[in-house]
Image (spheres, helix red, strand yellow):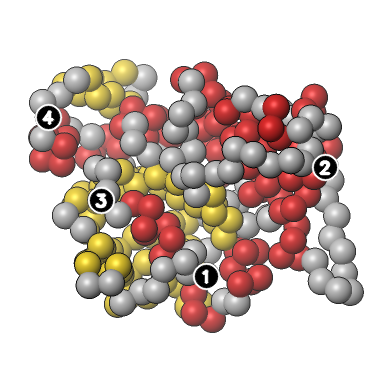
Amino acid sequence: MSLVVSNLEVNYGKNLILKDINLRLDKNKIVVILGKNGSGKSTLLKAITKQIKLEEGSIIIDDKSINQYNSKELAKTISYLPQIRPNNIDLLVKDIIKLGVYPYNSLFKKVDIDLNSVLNLFNLNNLANVSYNKLSGGEKQRVFLALAYTQNPKYLLLDEPTTFLDINYQIDTLNIIKDLSKKDMGILLVLHDFNLASRYADYVYIIDDKTIKYEGCPKDIFKKEIIKDIFKIDSKIIEADGYNYLIL
């Protein structure tokens, strides 16, 4: 089971955004995409979820072209959380989570979920009957992760899931994501934080100049010469607990 992007090219009008992108995501793995602002990280996720037309290349999901998936089939296969999510939703937490089964419902069949199990998994038990609008940023993030989980996807695509969160919520969110990867789910993350990527990624792709310039496991590519090449800054890399950490 794998999601494979090959020779991908994406344009916005006459502007080339991504070129010659090759990427692979396997089940039980966390793959992180890094790069400067505006490098095309979010665009790549949108292309994988058929929100943007491909100019060149292919996306193969479990040996089947993405073009062969209709919208409901794709929603059963990939769950996508964009970087910008709504702040104002006048629904209870439990009702938002239940929306995840939409792709499985039809006029003749209504699918239910084991709500208590999902609430337990995301530590939302005491918030089930609370309005989404009353939650903190970290709590809202857990609700959306729970919603994505109830879609029962094979692949979970998350665009900046730790943005605007305090460090404790960042760690809490990424620990949940790590647990999800152990449930036969492949997870593709866009992150900005090299140190979080170092701790949680199995594999990393760094986008620069519209293409993937570096790729590999964190220990192999988190090096000061690579950081300087991409971000034009001097840094130090220290090793601790088996991870490489960036110090500016």
Which of marks 4 and 1 precedes in the sequence? 1
Disc 3: which residue = 39
Q: Is residue 104 visible?
A: yes
Check the image and report above or below for 46 versus 231: below
Numbered disc in front, either 4 or 3: 3
Q: Which residue is mark 1?
A: 62
In the rendered structure, the answer to whether residue 81 lies left or right of residue 238 reads: right
- Give the alpha-carbon distance from disc 1 to disc 4, as whole Å: 40 Å
Mark found first going from the N terminus, 1 or 3: 3
For the point 43% across and 60% down, the residue is: 46
- Would residue 187 be seen by someone viewing this image from the given angle? no
Q: In the image, is residue 219 above or below residue 41?
A: above
Indicate the amino acid at tag 4: Ile
Q: CA distance from mark 1 to mark 2?
A: 29 Å
Assess disc 4: are there few (<14), some (14-19) or many (≥20) residues with their C-alpha within 10 Å of its C-alpha. few
Residue denoted by label 2: 115
Q: Earlier in the sequence, mark 3 or mark 2?
A: 3
Quarter occupied by residue 86: top right
Quarter of the rendering containing residue 128: top right
Q: Are marks 3 and 2 in contact (CB under 8 Å)?
A: no
Disc 1, SS: loop
Where does label 4 land, which residue? 233
Residue 212 pos. (x, y %):
23, 55
* Dot 2 alpha-carbon crowd within 10 angstroms: few under 14, some 14 to 19, many 20 or more: some
Question: Quick one: label 2 or label 4, which is nearer the N terminus?
Answer: 2
